[in-house]
Image: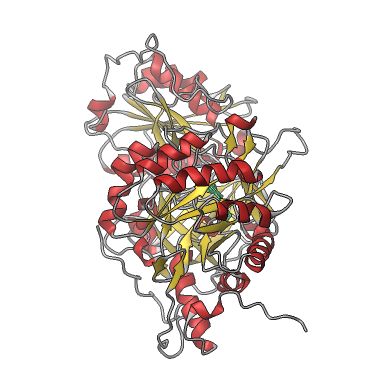
Amino acid sequence: MSEVRRIERTDAQAPRGAEGPPQPAVDLTTDLAGVALDNPILTASGCFAAGAEMDRFYDVTELGAIVVKSVTPEPREGLPTPRMAETPSGMLNAIGLQNPGIDAWLEHDLPWLQRKGAKVVASIAGKSVEDFREVARKLRRHAGIVAIEVNLSCPNVDHRGLVFACSARDSSEVITAVRRESDVPILAKLTSDVTDIVAIARAVVDAGADGLTLINTVLGMTIDPETGRPGLYNTYGGLSGPAIRPIAVRNVHQVHQALPEVPILGCGGARTVGDVVQFLRAGASAVSVGTATFVDPFIGPTLIAELTRWLADRDIDRVADLIGTVEPWS
Amino acid sequence: MMATRAGSVRGRTDTDGPVQVTCEVLARRREGAYWLLSIAAPTIAERARPGQFVNIAVEAPGTLLRRPFSIARVSKRGMAAGTVEVVFDAHGPGTAWLTSVDVHDVVDVVGPLGTPFPIPQRKVSCLLIGGGYGVAPLFFLADELTRKGLRVDMIVGAASQDRILNAIEAKRLTASVTFTTDDGSYGVHGRVTDAFDEVVDRCGSGVVYACGPNPMLRAVSERCRERSIPVQVAVEEHMACGIGVCFTCTLPLRQKDGSVRMKRACLDGPVFNGGRIAWEETRFEVGPPIVVDDDEEELPEPPRPTDADVWGDA
Ligand SMILES: Cc1cc2nc3c(=O)[nH]c(=O)nc-3n(C[C@H](O)[C@H](O)[C@H](O)COP(=O)(O)O)c2cc1C
């Protein structure tokens, strides 16, 4: 594999954010549900494929950890196209969990990540409790996997297709099953499309989740005004990108207020260093960046550099000191 | 992002992989019914091969994602060394915004992305078929094939005469060019496939390359299959990331074992073996099942130059 280098600029202009004196050392390390991370910038599942695709651009081990695309027991080819519709400051997607299946993932994708020395958060998905259990079992005792993220935004075939994450009971059953199988911390990834996010959060924590990922995409729809057809083959899809950031920050804050001891991986619309700081202040211990990668392949390293600078400029020594620091108006 | 200064390059130095660059706009002008954008992007120009594309950041209100464009031409040497050209139709907010950039403006570009057209491993007469602005990457390809000493003929199709992209360039780059228009306003009245047999017979075409709308690519691929001619097509799919991570730009590819796999147009393509695209299965329109059980339907083995002969792989 090739060496990562920023190619030097071809003209006299310095890159944005690189002017000024050398940056003093700030401590970017963070602890996410017992997992020690060098920095709080992670990828979001489904927005970084298996990792190797992005290594064409930069050394992906620069990131705090890599959350890979959700893996299911069997290979899945996913839904027909169109799978994507752009919306103001966001996009809808309905991919249908296309993935090679756990066996192929363990055979081809994980070894690459292990060779790189990446910290891997394995995202798992399924259509029944048994599916989750099976994938979790196969993920045991593999070097490099630092945590499991349980993608609960999947329809439960045993419950008339209701999404697991919309039911405290269904979510808890999955987490209980995964907890029994797993030898690493598990993060329950929840959806904001519920009446009471705190109730679901409490249920999965009681069932054994070590932390939470907040949030998955928000269900949405577009319709072509002329043809009358939905923008997506699947009719409905998940909204992501800057459009959902305030919803994500609110969920993180709400859950952190209710369950301050529960570690949170913030996710949804993060694109700038200011967004990252918002998630941390709201109570997240780290931040997953998804859709922003589609716009800017280098967003991860850029955010790490800008966060360092942001903290240094404000004489904040440790990023961890920012977590859960929302100042009251009065 | 919002790059304001040109000349920034991010990426790996020792590969021919993609980089992210901020580059100056050298020209933005009408090209018949279309638009041409020329940018100063030396690293991309150096690395690009015909069939690949670039992904350009647009700042139109209500947009978020980059827009992909096939590379129409690069200059690796001479006065204009380091330039990259793309041709586009202004049919949405992103492309409309791109028609408004000025010379000396700076755009943020990722590339080169995707797979290039494979070049024949042996001497064979090449037929290039383009529809609308899909002709653009074929100019880049024609140049490379000619440089390799191969004969290049072209069929250029469009809805009407005004939508034929740069007829002069097509003539300059080829041994022969046949024009077709849907309305008969120029050349053969009809589709590119209506001129297909005549051109193939006259030019002894041994391989076909095509770029244009999917229905055209499908029709060309089927014609090639009937005549047992290897065919490579460059598809244009809607994509969110362009870099292989989002799985939105997939299309169904038939594997050797008969199963159909959804492949990413941005990473596994945009150039595909046209004979392998499962146009008929079409996951473009119908839902699961995932794997197709068709023992009865085997691709006929071409008696003439096979894919293996021509491209050096199967
Ligand atoms: C194209 C696409 C595919 C996704 N696939 C998955 C997935 O497989 N598993 C999952 O848990 N979340 C998936 N997500 C959701 C993201 O991980 C993330 O929760 C969501 O996009 C919000 O973050 P963002 O706005 O930073 O993208 C996907 C999102 C997108 C846009």
Task: Tell me if residue B172 can be seen.
Answer: no
Q: Front-most of A143 and B148?
A: A143
Q: Quadrant of residue B147?
A: top left
Q: Quadrant of residue A284?
A: bottom right
Q: Residue at x 39, y 40 (%)?
A: B268
Image position of A182 (left or right of B32): left
Where is B77 relative to A329, above or below? above
Q: Front-most of B207 and B259?
A: B259
Task: Tell me if residue B57 can be seen.
Answer: yes
Image position of B85 (left or right of B206): right
Q: Quadrant of residue B183?
A: top right
Q: Residue at x 51, y 83 (%)?
A: A311
Q: Front-most of A152 and A217?
A: A152
Q: Front-most of A122 and B214?
A: A122
Residue B185 in picture, x, y percent from top left: 63, 28
Image position of A80 (left or right of A15): right
Quarter of the picture holding the C terminus of chain B: top left
Q: Residue at x 62, y 25 (%)?
A: B184
For the rendered model, the colour scheme is secondary structure
Image position of A23 (left or right of A327): left
Quarter of the picture holding the N terminus of chain B: bottom right
Residue A330 in picture, x, y percent from top left: 78, 84
Where is B294 relative to A65, above or below? above
Count the labels in the image. 0
Residue A290 in picture, x, y percent from top left: 53, 56
Residue A153 in picture, x, y percent from top left: 58, 44
